Amino acid sequence: MEAAIQSYWPTLVRWSLVGGTLGAMMYLLNTGLQRVGVKRDVARGYAFVLPWIIGFLVFSLYPFVYSFYLSFTEYNIFQPPRWIGLDNYVRMFTSDRNFWPSLRLTLLYAFFNVPLGMIGALGVALLLNRNVRAIGFWRTLYYLPAVLPAAAVALLWRWMFSPSSGLINFFLQPFYALFNMEPLAWFTDPNLVLPAYVIMGMWGVFGANAVILLAGLKNIPRELYEAAQIDGAGAWAQFRSVTIPMLSPTLFYTLVTGIIGALQIFTQAFFITTPQRAGQFLNVLIYQEAFAFRHMGYASALAWFLLMVILVLTLLVIRSSALWVYYESERG
Amino acid sequence: MKRPIFLFNLLLILGLIVSACAVPVTAPAAAPGEQPAPAAQKVTIRLATWAGVDESAELQVLLDQINSEQDRFEIVHEPAPADYYTKIQTALAGGTSADLFWLSQEWIAGMAAQGALLDITDFLASDTTHPAANLDDYFPDILKTAQYQGRIYGLPWIAQPVVLYFNRALFDAAGVDYPTADWTWDDFVAAAAALTKDLDGDGKNDQWGFTMNGWPPPQMFVWQAGGEVITADLSASPIDTPEAITGFQFYADLIYDDVHTPPEAVIQEQGFGEMFKAGKIAMFMGGAADDLDRVPGLDVGVVRVPAGPAGRPTFAWTASTVIAAQTKNPELAYEALARLTEKIHGWKIVAPRKSLANVEALVAAEPRKEKNAAAIVEAIPDMRAFNIIPRHQEWDTIFWGDFMDPLFHDQGTAAELAPKIRPLLEELLP
C-alpha cells in the first residue's frame, strides 16, 4: 500500500503542479490585462479561456506541427527521429502495397456512406417534422446512436451481421428463400465488407444528422409554403423549390462533417475483424504502421496525406457551395 | 480590499506548487554487500503486465512474497489487460515506462534492436544465486526468443506447448478409437472425418472432428513436414520448399472444409474454443495451460499432437519479462526480475526450464492439470518456438494477409502462392 502511494506520488505532484501553475497564470493574466486597461469582464474572460488555449497549444497544435516534422523522418519512438526528406511520401505512392487499396476502400466508403446517410437523415427529419405524437421521444430515439460508445455499437453490429444468428439475415430470410440463395456472410465475405460498413455507418449518421436537419426544417418560414401553395405548387414542387433551397445551408454543413467523419472511420474497423483481402481503412493502416510496426514517421506521412485529402474535398465542397447553397442573407 | 484577497490567493497557489514540489526522494539502491535500507525506503520497481483480474490476483500473491522476502525494493504491479502493447510503447516513448514488463516472443527482438530493452547478459553471467538465472537450465529454443544478436534481453517465464485435447464422449459415440501418442497425420485426418457428423439429419453438419482458424499455427505443420518459415540464422524464409508446401497444403486442405472442420462462418458465430467446450468439436489443439480439460460435463483427454512426415515438433507459445533500458535502477530491476521469474516458474505451466519439465513440478504449479500432466510432459521435448526477426510484426502481416488468408480461402494452392510471397517476406529479414 505504501509502495502504491509512493508510486502515485509523482503523478499527484505533477497534477498539482499543472493545476497550480495554470491557476497562477490565470491570475497573472487577469491582473496584468486589467493593469494595461483591459475591462474587468474581458480580462476575466481571457483568464478563464487560458487553460483551454494552453491545452490546445500543448495537446493539439504542438502534436499537429510535430507530426508534420515527423512525416519527413524515420522514427521508431525509442530512438531520435532521423531526417529522411520525402522518402516516406515517395514510399507511400510508389512502394507501399497497402496504401492504394486502403485509399480506394476509404474513398469508396465515403462515396456511398455520405450521400446515403444524408438522404436517409433527410427522410427521417422530414418524418419527424410532421406533427407526430411524442416527437421528443422519436427525436431522442433517433439521436441515441450518436451518443452511444462507438466500440459498443461496433460489437452490436458485428452480431447483427452474423450470418446465421444475426438480425439482418433473419429479416432477409424470405428474400434468400425467394431467390434460393445462401445467407450473405457480410463481414467474412471480402466483397460484402464494404456494403456492411456502409449500412453500419449510416445508422450512426442518421440520428445525428436527422436532428440537425430537423432544426433546419423548423427554421423554414411557413409563409413560403403558403405562398407556394397559393401559386399551385404540389408537395414535390414545394420540397424541390422551398424545402431544399432553404435547407441547403444545413445540408452543406452535414455534407462537410459527413465527408470528414467518413474518411476518418476507425473505431468500427478496429473492433470488427474482416478478411485481410477486403483491405483496411486508411486510419487503420495509420494505426498499424504507428503502433504495430513503430513506423511513426511513415504513419505521420499517411496521416498528413489523409488530412490533405479531407482538406481538398472540403475545399471543393465549399467552392461548389456558391452553386447550390442558398443563404437568406444573400439576396439578389 | 480586493488586492489583498488576490495576493492571498496567489500566495495560496504558489504555496501549493512549492508543497507539491517536495517530492519524497526514493532511497538509493543498496550496493551488494551493504545492509538493506529500512523498509520504509524501499525502491519501487514497477511491473507492467497484460494480466486480467484473476491472473493479477494470483500474481499479486507472488509479488507479496517477493516484497516481504527482502528490504531493498517493492514490486508494484500495473496491469493493462487492454491494448497492452500500445500502452507499453507509448510509456517507453514518453520516458514513463515500468521497470519490468512482459513481452510475448515476437516483440522482444524488435524492441531490443531499437534500444528499448536492457541487455541483461552480464547480469546473468555474474549471477550465481538465482536458479532462474542459470541459462543452461532453459530449453535453448525457448531462450532464443529472448535473445537478439547473441545478447539476452529477458527471461522467458512460460513455454506452453500445443497438445491435442479430445472429447471422449464424441469418440465413444462415433466408435472411433481415442488418439494415441504415436498418431500420425493420416490417423488424425481419418478420425476427424469420422467424427464430423450431421446429428439431426437436417443436411447440415453440427459436429466436427477438428477445428482450425489460423490457430493452431500453420508453422507447426510446416515443421512437422520438415520445413521452416524463417531459418535459424534469420537469413531466409523458405516457405516454398517442398517440405514447407506439404505442411501448408495439409493445413489448407483441412481448414473450413466442413468435412473435417467447421466452415468459417460457423466458427465466427459460435466461437472457436467455445465450440469445443460446447461439445461440438471432437479434437482441439490448444496450449498445455488451457482450461479445456476441466470443462464441467466434458470428459477430455490430452495427448501429444500427431506426427507429420518429419516428426512431431509442437509450437510453444513463449513470453518473457524484460527490463526497460530507461529504468533508473538497473541492478534492482535485475534482482527483481530474477526473483520474479523464479516465482513465475513455480506458477505458470510449462516453465521453460529442463529441471522443472517433470510431472511433479507441473502439478505443483497447476494442480488442476494433474490428470493430464504426463501427456503434457511428454510433449515438452518436442517444443519449438518461432525464429523471431526484429521486424516480425511486419513479416507476420504479410505472411497472414498475403499468404495464409488467400490459401485458407482457396485463392491458390500453397505451391502457387508461396514462391510469390517468399521475396516479400525476405525483404524484411535482417
Image (spheres, rainbow, N blue to C red):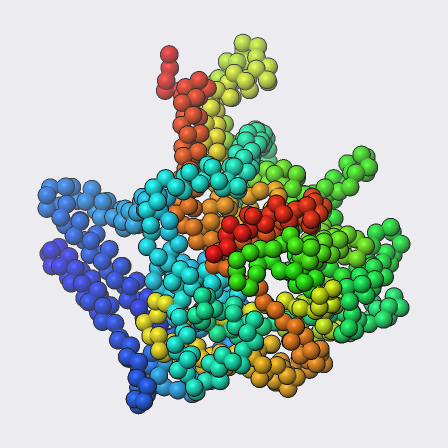
Q: Picture coordinates of residue B134 (x, y %)?
A: 48, 82
Q: What's the residue at 78%, 70% (across, down)?
A: B183
Q: In the rendered view, does A86 fall on the left or right side of B311? A: left
**As rendered, which of B396 and B384 lies closer to the eye?**
B384
The answer to whether B16 is drawn above or below residue B201 in the figure is below
Placement of B385 over or under B131, stated as above or below: above
Which corner quadrant holds the N terminus of chain A?
Answer: bottom left
Q: Residue at coordinates 28% horizontally, 80% vertically from top-left? A: B27
Res. B272 in view: no
The residue closer to the viewer here, B361 or B86, is B361
Name the residue at the top extreme: A231
A310 shown above or below B270: above
Q: Is residue B139 visible?
A: yes
Vertical comparison of B131 with B294: above or below: below
Location of the C terminus of chain A by quadrant is top left
How many marks are shown on the rendered structure?
0
Q: Report the residue at 33% width, 51% height from top.
A: A81
Q: Which residue is depicted at the point 51% across and 80% down?
A: B136
Q: Position of residue B167 (x, y in %)?
A: 78, 69
Horizontal and vertical percent for residue B243? Answer: 69, 58
Q: Nearer the viewer, residue B302 or A129?
A: B302
Direction from residue B143 to residue A171 in the image, left or right: right
Q: Position of residue A296 (x, y in %)?
A: 40, 50
